[in-house]
Image (cartoon, rainbow, N blue to C red):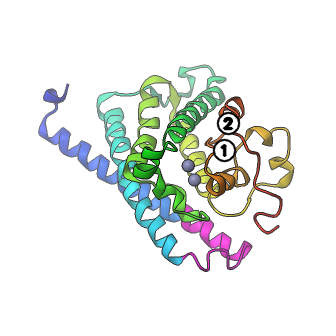
Amino acid sequence: MLESLDHPAWFAAIGSAAAMTVIVAVRYVLSSGGFALATRSVRPGLYDKLGPQIGAEIRWSLLSAAIYGVPAGIVAWGWRERGWTRIYTDIGEFPLWWLPVSLFVYMFAHDTWFYWTHRWMHAPRPFRIAHAVHHASRPPTAWAAMAFHPIEALTGAVVIPALVFLVPIHIAVLGLVLTIMTIMGVTNHMGWEIFPRALVHSRLGQWLITASHHQLHHEKYRCNYGLYFRVWDRICGTDAGLAKPGWDGR
Ligand SMILES: [Zn+2]
Ligand SMILES: [Zn+2]
């Protein structure tokens, strides 16, 4: 396949990878920056002594933006120019019920991949090499959303670009998946709970991951490994519940 690509195609693919890197970096700065600003007014002083840590979080995150942007940009180019992937734009191509189901399938597949790679990265050697960077955020801030060592970033960056080859998804649902991924990545690290208590402590909340759950992972390390859902943590006995009441000062 690769030999059949003419030079302009390669330039276009590289250009798409570069453009996507810029898009991911801008998305990071706007989303993390936006929630960091919100933190200033909702929890004044929460990040006051964390200046050097935030600097490191931003540097690692911008490096991660390239690692996420390159495969996504190449796949986006292949989708546009070569008909790669199972992304579809005609909403009638699959039954309407597939729209919400595909959203759930993508989130559950991503969550499953994340849970098991995350648990693996808590073994001593992978932790030291790859995952310690993320846990240097103590406590995490909104800027830690993409603060990963390149090895960890790579494990995250391949998920959606691989799934689009396997599972049909409407372009708008894919946009929703990426939006949820971005917002949850930021808010889970923000240091305070943005979702109402009524949801976090509800029956549904027992299966969903928000900041109250992920904060405890950053405190205790060996529990609460999931991304969106508490299913794998519950099945595997690694769910330690939520951070103690009042953890975020409310
Ligand atoms: Zn984290
Ligand atoms: Zn971890």
159 to the left or right of 115:
left
The answer to whether residue 209 is seen in the rendering is yes
Q: Which mark is residue 224?
A: 1
119 to the left or right of 207:
left
Answer few, some or many: residues within 10 Å of disc 1's Cα (few below 14, many 20 plus, some between 14 and 19).
many
Q: Secondary structure at mark 1?
A: loop
In front of the other: 81 or 21? 21
Residue 200 pos. (x, y %): 80, 49
Name the residue type under label 2: Asp
**Residue 14 vertical position relative to residue 234 in the rendered view, above or below:** below
Q: Which residues are magenta?
A: 31-50
The residue singled out by tag 2 in the image is 233
Q: Secondary structure at mark 2?
A: helix
**Residue 67 vertical position relative to residue 159 in the rendered view, above or below:** below
- Badges 1 and 2: C-beta atoms under 8 Å apart? yes
Marked residue nearer the N-terminal end (1 or 2): 1
Please report the residue visible at 43 percent of the width from the left and 41 percent of the height from the top: 155
Residue 197 pos. (x, y %): 84, 54
